[in-house]
Image (cartoon, helix red, strand yellow):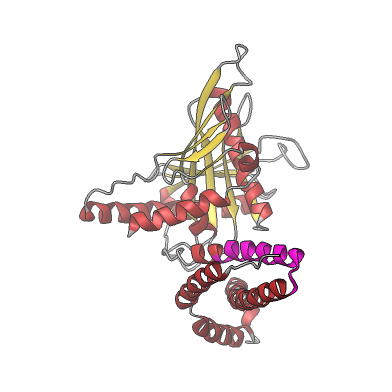
């Protein structure tokens, strides 16, 4: 049996991994852990619950980073030993195991490499995602609901905490709009590349003639506001309206005026929340989302000023960015990166990692 030679692939992985370690800086991470441990050991830590949560989360996240780096390093070393054993024994099953481990490591190191690109000011934040149906009637509202499910399934697969804050149901099928949080570190940096106009092409289930229909939905991704952010919203700048929750029934739904709608008068930004039973909780959540959107507006204004000073940028962010084609053929294609797959069902079931990775790399090239 012929020996397998994966030395070239392993050298490439080691070079990439060395670059990742240089960026991540494990030595500094270890120092950060010690500082966070000291803070976490403070007997008065939980006097401020928000601060305590931030410290313990940062500690857990940093320790996980170090563990991940150490695990990948060990697996790289073990892979070379495994290849030598496979070749010495001429064992095809061990050779197959070595090849499978190489593929797995290529995927994990690729993910680590992408994470090093998430170094924007707000990339480490949790994300608030809003989906709005566009042109296309019932197909558009149905498409908006398909996109919401896609992102929630993505969060579920990656074990990312997600909470739906508000849904406006359409009279026919689907939803007019929905807002939900994905409360995980780097959720904004990862998912911000999903912002823009999405297009669906399919044989319409709502058209008796069975004609092909094109519909659109807009996805907005903003960083979740933190307590340390300074976004002052004077009471005089907002109007608060309360109303009864809508949508599928359930205990306490449609029985009290617990839902809250807040309008930011200067910008015209409107935020609703009806997920909680308490009007006070809904108002707090709505204010948090409003602050997040105002923070994003401020960030976009600053970016627009930078772009104006820098001159025209060829890539246009926020325009139509992805097409989902179900008829006459099956394809999902990102128009910025040209990344495409021929399995829309898997994509709508939350398998969007390839699109996200390609878009993060594309964004980095455009910014550089």
Q: Where is 4 relative to 220, above or below? A: below
The answer, for residue 287, to whether it is visible in the render is: no
Left-right relation of 190 to 81: left
Name the residue: 59% across, 61% down.
107
Name the residue: 57% across, 87% down.
34
122 magenta-colored: no
Q: Where is 155 relative to 19, above or below? A: above
Considering depth in this image, is 37 or 243 the residue closer to the camera? 37
Q: Main secondary structure of the magenta part?
A: helix
In the picture, residue 245 is in which quadrant?
Answer: top right
Q: Where is 188 relative to 140, above or below? A: below
Position of the C terminus, as image quadrant, is: bottom left
Position of the N terminus, as image quadrant, is: bottom right
Residue 352 image position (x, y, % from top left): 58, 48
Residue 208 image position (x, y, % from top left): 63, 12
Q: Where is 352 relative to 77, above or below? A: above
Residue 61 image position (x, y, % from top left): 60, 72
Considering depth in this image, is 294 or 88 the residue closer to the camera? 88
Residue placed farthest to the top in the image?
209
Instruction: State the count of labels.
Output: 0
Residue 106 image position (x, y, % from top left): 58, 63
Magenta-drawn segment: 89-109
The answer, for residue 364, to whether it is visible in the render is: yes
Residue placed farthest to the right in the image?
251
């Amino acid at each position: 049996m012929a020996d397998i030679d994966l030395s070239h692939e392993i050298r490439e992985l080691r070079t990439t991994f060395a670059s990742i370690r240089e960026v991540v800086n494990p030595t500094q991470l270890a120092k950060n852990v010690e500082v966070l441990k000291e803070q976490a050991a403070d007997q008065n830590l939980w006097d401020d619950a928000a601060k305590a949560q931030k410290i313990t989360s940062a500690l857990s996240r940093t320790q996980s980073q170090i563990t991940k780096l150490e695990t990948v390093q060990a697996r790289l070393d073990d892979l070379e030993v495994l290849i030598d054993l496979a070749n010495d024994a001429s064992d095809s099953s061990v050779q197959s195991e070595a090849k499978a481990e190489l593929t797995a490591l290529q995927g994990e190191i690729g993910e680590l490499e992408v994470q090093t690109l998430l170094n924007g000011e707000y990339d480490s934040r949790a994300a608030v995602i809003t989906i709005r149906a566009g042109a296309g009637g019932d197909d558009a509202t149905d498409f908006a609901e398909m996109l919401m499910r896609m992102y929630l399934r993505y969060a579920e697969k990656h074990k990312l905490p997600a909470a739906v804050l508000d849904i406006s149901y359409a009279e026919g099928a689907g939803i007019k709009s929905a807002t939900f949080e994905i409360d995980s570190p780097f959720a904004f940096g990862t998912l911000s590349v999903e912002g823009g106009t999405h297009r669906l092409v399919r044989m319409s289930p709502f058209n008796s003639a069975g004609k092909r229909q094109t519909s659109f939905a807009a996805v907005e991704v903003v960083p979740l506001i933190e307590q340390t952010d300074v976004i002052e919203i004077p009471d005089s700048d907002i109007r608060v309206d309360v109303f009864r929750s809508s949508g599928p029934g359930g205990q306490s739904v449609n029985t009290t005026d617990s839902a809250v709608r807040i309008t930011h008068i200067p910008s015209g930004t409107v935020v609703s929340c009806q997920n909680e039973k308490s009007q006070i909780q809904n108002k707090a959540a709505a204010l948090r989302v409003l602050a997040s959107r105002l923070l994003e507006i401020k960030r976009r204004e600053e970016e627009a000023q930078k772009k104006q000073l820098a001159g025209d940028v060829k890539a246009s962010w926020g325009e139509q960015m992805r097409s989902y084609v179900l008829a006459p053929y099956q394809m999902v294609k990102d128009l910025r990166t040209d990344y495409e797959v021929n399995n829309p069902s898997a994509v709508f079931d939350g398998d969007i990692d390839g699109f996200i990775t390609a878009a993060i790399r594309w964004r980095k090239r455009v910014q550089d």
